[in-house]
Amino acid sequence: MPDVRVRFAPSPTGPLHIGGVRTALFNYLYARRHGGRFILRIEDTDVARSMPEHEQDILSGLAWTGMTWDEGPEPGGGDRGPFGPYRQMQRRDRYRAAADRLLAADAAYPCFCTPEELDAERRRQEAARQAPRYSGRCARLTPADRLAFEREGRPAAVRFRVAERVVAFDDLVRGHVEIDAANLGGDFVILRADGTPLYHFTVVVDDADMAISDVIRGEEHLSNTPKHILLFEALGHHVPRFAHLPLILNADRTKMSKRRSQTALSAYMSEGFVREAMVNYLALLGWSTGTEEEILSLDELASRFDLDHVQKGGAVFDRERLEWVNGQWIRRLPVDEFVERLRPFLVRDREQGRIDRLPTDDELRSLAPVIQERLPRLGAVGDLIGFLFVDRVAADPAQLVPKRWDAATTLEALCGVREAVARHDEVTWEADELEPPLRELVAARGWKAGDLFMAIRVAVTGQTSAPPLFDTLVALGRARTLARLDAAIVALADRREGEAVEPVGHG
RNA sequence: GCCGCAUUCGUCUAGAGGCCCAGGACACCGCCCUCUCAAGGCGGAGAUCACCGGUUCGAAUCCGGUAUGCGGUACCA
């Protein structure tokens, strides 16, 4: 399949959307698979809703996923590629020129109807339970009529004449599709009265100019495809192939929306979903390899991608599954990479006062084996090991006492632990060295290891769940372990005496 | 209203006439491992393949229709 050229053409009317990422991804994978080019184009003709910060969000989000575009806008404002510019607002002369050609060929005509008139017409049709459709009033205007309107100073939009015929195409996902042009709603506007072009027009002019071979986009455009085909033909251009992707759905099976789901890629990024997981999960939403492979990198996906296995029905976005894929990828990260990616989240925790100091890279590297498999998201790191980097921990006396024990036993146990642990110096402060003496203590008293360990865990972490206890003690260090044990002992003793003392531990 | 598209376990999917009284994964439940939480291992439950007809020796797979859902129907994209 020579000369495959595909594009992702988002509108900067909002932040980069999960659905957009998936559309971009399928285009990207298709291009890579077929040795083609992946082009990015910004469709910013809706001046009122387009915002520079949204364009920035789209560019940076896309870059984050690892999808690189061969042609398109640069973040700075420039362009890369021979078919630029790649921002539609900078291509207005082309749309004007294309419209002029259509006008000259009488394939399009000026329409002087006012929005109010069109609105009234539409309401009348709806009231009569008819399909809304442009009456074609201005289609039959004589040159003299047009001149008269122009003298009145009435601004004119430009309408494209819709031929009376059936438009057919073979969608790469859905197969043969036929739509009678009579159901398109009549002649449609391609240029507003103020001269700015409309989506259906720009998309065709640009796809033609940029020699796009395959238009891969969301299913919401399927019904509009005949308009595009008619335009390609009227402009004298080769019609590209089309592939309409199934929609990504909210849990209630409506089109995924900000209203009912978290749709912004940036929101997932800041929760600590990693790029590999996002790409992996989205690629398998509406497409499958046809095998039972599940965890695949961007390159592996590209080598397997094809449009044949694209699902036709919409797919519900399942966050639980995304988290599972995310966990798979977090575990696969090389340690240094893991530490580097964790850093921004810890910096944020520090800024928000959730921790009192930042761990060093060395500390994180040694913690990696016990936390890498416990993180569903990088952003959860504070919940997991935040207690290591706070000055003090507040162990709740109530939680300190294991279910099978009473306060007296717990107090006695913690004192015994403090004594046993204090016998270690910095040199023997290793998990392998710390565990045996405590096991002996358990055996001597006829306790259950789980009970003792839980009491210690709560004393030194303030939590009932944490990484394995002895790794935790090693990470904590001798001094802080002893201090926190002391604090817990004091808190428990105070409570036994019935005094209302705040349980405060010291780091 | 009109037009279009879709419909396999709760969810993502495998399946392209016999390999399927439907396989995998997530989630769920149980067991194992185990100092908690995870991870991992093993097992379980979960789909009359939307429904009704037809074609065929044989249909989840082909053909009609019905239902339901979704999308489109703008001087939005």
Image (cartoon, rainbow, N blue to C red):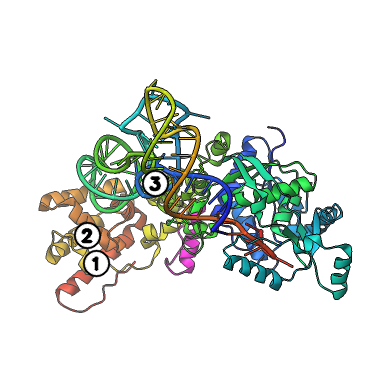
**Crowdedness near tag 1: few (<14), some (14–19) or many (≥20) residues, C-alpha within 10 Å:** many
Q: Chain of mark 2?
A: A
Disc 1 from disc 3: Cα separation: 28 Å
Q: Earlier in the sequence, mark 2 or mark 1?
A: 2
Label 2 sits on what residue type? Ala
Q: Which region is colored magenta? A: A341-359
Q: Chain of mark 3?
A: A
Quadrant, the N terminus of chain A: top right
| Image disc number at residue A378 | none
Q: Is residue A78 visible?
A: yes
Label 3 sits on what residue type? Pro
> What residue did someone put label 2 on?
A455
SS for callout 3: helix
Q: Is residue A366 visible?
A: no
> What residue did someone put label 1 on?
A488
Q: Position of residue A301 (x, y in %)?
A: 54, 38
Q: How many marks?
A: 3
Label 1 sits on what residue type? Ala
Indicate left or right for A429 with A92 as reference.
left
> What residue did someone put label 3 on?
A369
- Say which residue appears at 34% left-offset and 66% top-offset: A507
